[in-house]
Image (tube, rainbow, N blue to C red):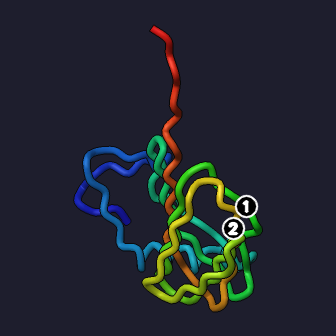
Amino acid sequence: MPQLGHTYLRTHRLKGNVLSFALRGEATAIEQSAAYRRSGRTAKTLVNAGRLRVEVVALRKGASMAQHRAKGHVTIHVLRGALRVTTTEGPADLAPGGLVVLAPNVTHAVTARRDASFLLTLALERKVSLSTP
């Protein structure tokens, strides 16, 4: 839940200068959701502000996010459980507190080795426009 009295809109857009979240509480809440109980995976967007997106994600043991790639930098920070992040450079096994940072367009897959929750951050690249004087 956001703290410090700042506005948190249903659209999850950043309002004000500071948002604060209790990540363990956010993770626990989505792990208790119907979607998680039904499919073994769910996510909640905490921030969607321009080029920045922050989500808390829960995966049941054995559940995965299929191979994909993102157009921006990605961070995966494990809050609870264990994950394997597999890229073309090989697997990275993460325990609580583990962090992986991926460059834009790196193909990767994420698999829960144990029931897990993690913070996923996507920072999209700034579009560069060339203009002639």
Residue in the image at 27% along x and 45% along y:
16
In the foreground, 92 or 51: 92
SS under mark 1: strand
Q: Is residue 95 left or right of residue 19?
A: right
**Residue 79 percent location from the top left of the image:** 47, 81
* Residue indicated by mark 2: 108
Q: Residue at x 55, y 85 (%)?
A: 94
Residue 36: x, y in percent? 66, 76
Residue 116 falls in image quadrant: bottom right
Marks 2 and 1, how far apart at CA: 6 Å
Judged left or right of residue 104, residue 10 is left
Question: Relative to 5, does residue 40 appear above or below in the rendering?
Answer: below
Q: Residue at x 67, y 74 (%)?
A: 89
Q: Residues within 10 Å of mark 2 (few under 14, many from 20)?
A: some
The amino acid type, in three-letter code, at marker 2 is His
Frontmost residue, 30 versus 75: 75
Residue of label 1: 68
Can you give x and y, in whole percent of width and height, for residue 98 in the image? Answer: 47, 82
- Residue 53 versus residue 129 in the image, above or below: below
